[in-house]
Image (tube, helix red, strand yellow):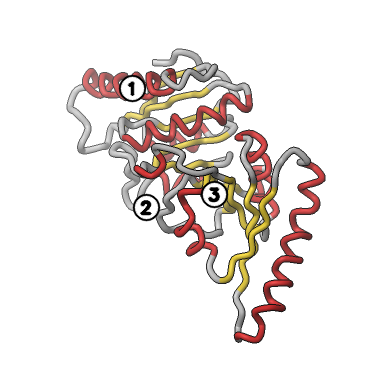
Amino acid sequence: MCDSCSAPAVVVGVDGSRAAIQAALWAVDEAVGRDIPLRLVYVIDPADPSAADSDRSQFASARTALYCAQRAVEATGEPVKIETETLTGKPLAKLAEESRSAAILCVGSIGTKHACRGSGSVAAALPALAQCPVAVVGVSPSRAVKRRPRSILVEVDNGTALHHAFEEARLRRVPLRAVAAWYPEIPEDIGDGKRLARAHLGRQVARWTRLYPDVTVEPTVVRGSLCRYLAQNAESVEVFVRASRDCGADRPVECPVLTVRASHL
């Protein structure tokens, strides 16, 4: 089934899970902001032992999952063009193929149909294989209602991530929280270390603030681990933008995580 297959598009892997629905909803702003279609893709894995015996029932499950995701997106009232397609094959391989022409690829953090045998979940493996940025979106009750203003979060030490973070902040019209982490070795270093970290942060964002004068930047100096800071402040994060080797690559994060690589520039 293919309603239409335009490129580029914001592609969402749909598998009938709640996380996949959340990924589709999160991706709406990405598609609207770029003025490109939102493409919902369901992948039938013939080797999945949990799949139904008949092709008819498998395609029925695909239609149901795509229909539910499409209805959820339509309920937002946003002016987004929706495309749907059902593919057959290994979910990881098929979504990696989709990334060749996608502007961004979105998946749920947990999906009942997107297990990747031998290498964890598709959500964990996809960022390393995709040829476009990959957003992994989870389901969290605290994210159902926006209780306080949110920001794009990025560590300033990676230029690729910083560039994409500014793009996300502009697209979503939210502030950018640029973080510099520092680790004082002895208590006497606290004052000087913090000043050096703040100066480093200012230098790193200066170029980008000139290119993105419409983006509000929130400079933030963090003592210790960025991962710990993220865990404590996830509810205030709209999107955490990271390079593939940065914090969050191998652990659950309670906010959407957008992974980028130098090749995605």
Name the residue type under label 2. Ser
User: Outermost residue toward the front?
Assistant: 147
Answer with mark 3 or mark 2, whichever residue precedes in sequence.
2
- Check disc 2: other Cα within 10 Å, few if <14, some if 14-19, many if 20+: few
Q: Which residue is mark 3?
A: 240
Q: Position of residue 213 (x, y in %)?
A: 78, 41
User: Vertically, is 47 above or below 221?
Assistant: above
SS class, disc 2:
loop
Q: Which residue is mark 1?
A: 68
- Check disc 3: other Cα within 10 Å, few if <14, some if 14-19, many if 20+: many
Q: Are marks 2 and 1 in contact (CB under 8 Å)?
A: no
Q: Identify which residue is drawn at 63% across, 35% down.
A: 173
Q: Is residue 253 left or right of residue 200?
A: left
SS class, disc 1:
helix
Q: Is residue 63 left or right of residue 200?
A: left
SS class, disc 3:
strand
Q: Position of residue 17 (x, y in %)?
A: 31, 34
Q: Which residue is mark 2?
A: 119
- Check disc 1: other Cα within 10 Å, few if <14, some if 14-19, many if 20+: some
Q: Identify which residue is drawn at 33% across, 22% down.
A: 68
Q: Identify which residue is drawn at 21% across, 38% down.
A: 49
Q: Are marks 3 and 2 in contact (CB under 8 Å)?
A: no
Q: Identify which residue is drawn at 72% across, 78% down.
A: 192
Q: Disc 3 and disc 2: Cα gap in Å?
A: 24 Å
Q: Disc 1 and disc 3: Cα gap in Å?
A: 27 Å
Name the residue type under label 3. Phe
Q: Disc 2 and disc 1: Cα gap in Å?
A: 29 Å
* Nearer the observer, 39 or 26: 26
